[in-house]
Amino acid sequence: MKMESWNRGNDKSFIKILYPKQDRGITFLKIDTTMWQYVPKIEKTIKIPSSMMMQSWMGSDFTNDDMAKESSIVEDYNPQLTAEDANKYTLTLLPKPDAPVVWGKIVMEVEKEHFIPLRAIYYDEEGGVQRILTYSGVKVYGSRYLPTVMTLIPQDKKSNKTVVTMDEVDFNALIEDERFTKNALIRYSR
Amino acid sequence: MILFKMAVRELLTHKKRSIVTLALSTFSTALFIFANALNNGSHNQIIRSSVEIYPGYMQITNRAFEDNPNFDNLIFDAANVTKILHKIDEINASAVRFEAYALYSTDEQSIGGMFTAIEPENEAHVSRLKRSLVEGEYLSRDDTNALYLGVELAKRLGVGVGDKLSFISTGADYSFAADNLVVKGLFKTKLYEFDNTAGFVNKGYFDEVMQSRNIATHIIMTPTDVKQIDTVTQKVQNALEADLEVKNYKTTLEDLILAMEIDTIFGYITLGIFFIVIFFVIGIFAFLSVYARIRQIGVLRAIGTTPKQVMRMLLIEAMILGCLSVGLGGAAGAYASHHYEKYPIEIASLVDVDAQEYAKQYNMVAEATFPAEFNPPRILMDMLIMMLLNLMTVLYPILLINRFTPTEAIRYV
């Protein structure tokens, strides 16, 4: 699958599917924690309800929640530095008492020099590892260091793997406000 | 014979006493049989409804599907499995299903629910889906884009028969699937949670949009004889590949069956209390009636009647009353069981309020009718228990009375 994505901060994002052919033109809009999807085949804009947030996104191992970032690792979790070595910090993120999240714990490893995420291990409430997200392919964009490859392996389906590779990244690009409206779902679908 | 004649004469002489004992025992027998029949009948109905509405008597799944119900653990050659099933005489009907999850969407609402493919004609033989139609039409094998929807889900989506809605889902190959649907029919099964989440389409159409040709999550079967279900389950299992698993309703509805068994135990405890009360009432009556005749028994002993003969005479009396009352009560109980098996008791008002809430909470069928079970062997067993109970009630008075010497008995005031 190939897609384009436009983001403004953490609150607004727009995704357009380019490939495969049968899915071309499917668009997603996320504003704050709300997500819509436009499906050209049925000419319909669908709001993704909260109950569907943990469902698979486009058949991948990522969930709608991952795409919408409905739950935020900054706002919904309390971080704790649990280990440190010469190259990386290990943070344990525990959900805040009333946070609407599904993970019981997230353990994140962050590279020390440029604060680049290396790995995130997601645990369920019983303490079992559910999935492991690995970051790699760090590229430099001006003063930014960005891992351009994300590999997600669900632990209940270890034969599965979803790899997201960022081919091109453009920071500080001018994005028109209209991009983050529901009308854009249809307009930019073509 | 003389003892029998004496017993009969004694019963006829004290008609009032005999009639009261007879009536008490007859009523108890009838009530006991009917209470048992109603208890068993209701349990059978709840289990039957829960099985037949959707889960089915027997099912085949991929062995790994229960622990990991994803699209990697499916039945990947459903046609071959169906072919094998056709060769097994003990299987009366079978139907292929593909259960998926979809987001149903109208202009106003988007709600997640079950999105299941069925073979409409075969499905009608393994579940009550077709019979649960309340509006519009059931599915047919040529349908495309036609949705058979639970009434409660339809209410939440705000759609009725003829209305359009869309779905998005993930296909069997994990591809993105979406299409527009038209509501063809609405069903109501009385299983609230099911009516609130389920939608069905024709499998031929589903296979096109969900890339699931010849693939199934479940194959549901009905055995020719439900009583032989464990044997048939094993036979089907032996005929299939090892990666497929056959289960019957005793496993798939294990919790419900356990709940019914627990309820049966509580029913027996209630009946046990009932037994104790009846035992004491009849026992006291027997005790008083024997003690009222202590002087008469003293005379009989004085003219040469042995304690054993006295015991036999009193047992014959109890036997005569017992046979009559158990016979009459048994007939009345059997008639009531038979009648209410054919014409179940209806308590619609109860179902409208409390029972529906209870059923919603426990995802059980909210039954408005309570049938009895007419089961002759069980009725005969209940009659035998009541007969023994009748005989036991006179044992203690007999033992007490035989302790008296003839002189003590004659002088007893």
Image (spheres, coloured by chain):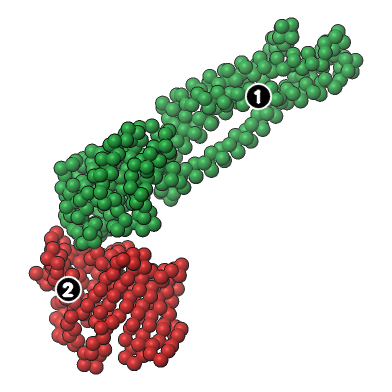
Chain colours: A red, B green
Q: Residue at the spot x=18%, y=54% of the render?
A: B209
Marked residue chain, label 1: B
Give coordinates of residue B402: x percent, y percent.
Answer: 82, 20
Amino acid under disc 2? Met
Which residue is more in the foreground, B120 or A20? A20
Q: Which residue is mark 1?
A: B388
Amino acid under disc 1? Leu
Q: Secondary structure at mark 2?
A: strand
**Furthest residue toward left:** A190
Q: CA distance from mark 2 to mark 1?
A: 82 Å
Q: Please identify the quadrant where the C terminus of chain B is shown.
A: top right
The number of numbered badges drawn on the structure is: 2
Give coordinates of residue B359: x percent, y percent.
Answer: 42, 46
Q: Residue at the spot x=35%, y=87% of the render?
A: A111
Q: Which residue is mark 2?
A: A3
Query: Which quadrant holds residue B288?
Result: top right
Which residue is more in the foreground, A28 or B291? A28
Q: Secondary structure at mark 1?
A: helix
